[in-house]
Amino acid sequence: MMELKFLNVGILTWITFLPVLGMIVVLLLPKNNKTAMRWTSLGVTILQMALSVVIFQYFNRGLAGINTVDGMQFKEFIPWIDVQSLAILGRLKIDYFLGIDGISVSMVMLTALVSFVATIASWNIEKSVKGFFALLLLLNTGMMGVFVSLDFFLFYIFWEVMLLPMYFLIGVWGGPRREYAAIKFFIYTLFGSVLMLLAMLALYFSVSVIDPSTGMKMHTFNMLAMMNPANFDPASLLGGLGTSMRYYAYVALFIGFAIKVPIFPFHTWLPDAHVEAPTAISVILAGVLLKMGTYGLMRIAFPIFPDAAIYFAYPLAFVGFINIIYGALCAMAQTDFKKLIAYSSVSHMGIVILGMAAFNSQGMVGAIFQMFNHGTITAMLFLIVGVLYDRAHTRGLNDFGGLMNKMPKYSAVMVIAFFAALGLPSMSGFVSEAFVFLGAFQTYRYLTIASAFGIVLTAGYMLWTLQRVFLGTLPEKWNGLTDINTRELISLVPLAVIVIFLGIYPMPIINLMNTSANALVEFVRSGAGMALVGR
């Protein structure tokens, strides 16, 4: 497999830790040199985008990773922590192990794109500029690290690294109730992290591999080793397919990831966090952070616990249905622009869950593609809210009307985002939703039919919002509003182009994920030792 290195350092290390280098530069800059801080941060994200383009170019579309080292691409493996012990634990060895496959490559590209857009959206931040951009870059590294880690211990570290900067970015630069929203986000996520930690420890003590230096067995955090049933000690806590302890561990992992998605009823932190977060942080929160939950299920929970994944397939599909309908109904009831989009995210991530739970190729490809599409579309929606809030200082949907004549360029971009969000054909969201429903219908016919009504509800609240804000008569108090400026267009136009291009020709992204999605489905279904139960 080809290795891409710059200055003898692998490309995945560069794309992950480049923001940390940028953060150090920002912290060393003079306090008053705000312009240099902004441009340094933007330069880092542009370089990150360039690296993601290189990864896209050299990625082998025909190679499936999932559970084999040879299947992973751009691998980097360095011994990191090695503790020799005479105690019963034996040798403690943790490796710096990075790699990507078709499931993670689109998330790496999405993270680079959304981070670039969020940096541009942060240009008008004036409060503690150095601290803001330093934390934004650290958050970037945490997100990227989650998507490239193949060692569970390393994955967990990046998962936790992401938590701290997000807490401060909401709590310091957010709205009037920012402290409440930040603490709620922190507590929810930390609770999920504790469950994930317990499951990780149980896996560590249940999985053993041969130590090449001694020939003796040792425990490991290697996620690929954890996916091989032969590495589980039959007498260990999680040994043996179909045991109750494996189901408990799967549920613990599921809750940890479900909070991040968020899946009902763990979703209540999301509207508060979105409403209080500054625009750029809302863009990252919806564009990337929610995907970390569904990615964790695909990368860790499903292949390590295929038996439990199949056993809980119908309950997973059912909570996906609840997310779709409940999120859409809540969105329809909102009068705050940001809350409406926050609840729409709950609904759209339910579509991802439904596709994953189908455990067939169409559903899984649709779910991964929906993750990418939701990231770009929702980023556009939150940027649109930010543009309006910067001018009017209100997000009340009933406070506006007639903006289409006053702000034509802004309205044009908004129409693209709104119709993409409701899944209009020729927009990227339609393709991924169609794949999800095609896959889910094969397995959960009636549940899929019921879930499809979420499309009608989405069209309802999106069109109603468009009518209230952009059509009708413009109130006199908004006569001074100005149209979207060049900087704001630079952040929105690339997303709009991607949404339209992938709606017309989705194969560039589908080709990336297709082989690995098929491999994941096959691995889970065969690893469970039973046929997929369609109910």
Image: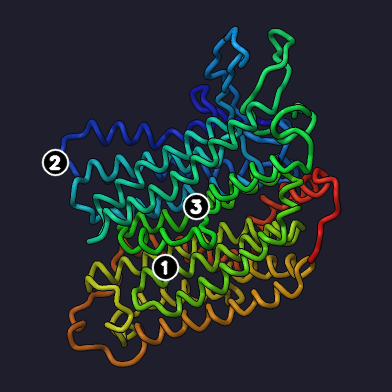
Mark closer to the observer (2, 1): 1
Residue under the point 44% across and 47% down: 189
> Which one is earlier in the sequence, the residue at label 3 or at label 2?
2
Q: For the residue labelled by badge 3, is the local secondary structure a helix, a strand or a loop? A: helix
- Name the residue tied to disc 1: 381
For the residue marked with disc 3, what is the amino acid?
A: Lys
Residue 231 vs residue 106: left or right?
right
Residue 235 vs residue 471: left or right?
right
- Name the residue tied to disc 2: 32
Q: How crowded is mark 2: few (under 14 residues within 10 Å), some or many (20 or more)?
A: few
* Residue 504 visible to the viewer: no
> Which one is earlier in the sequence, the residue at label 2 or at label 1?
2
For the residue marked with disc 2, what is the amino acid?
A: Asn
Give the quadrant of the C terminus. Answer: bottom right
Q: For the residue labelled by badge 1, is the local secondary structure a helix, a strand or a loop? A: helix
Q: Give the image quarter of residue 505.
A: bottom right
In space, the residues marked 3 and 2 are separated at their CA atoms by: 36 Å
Residue 113 vs residue 359: left or right?
left
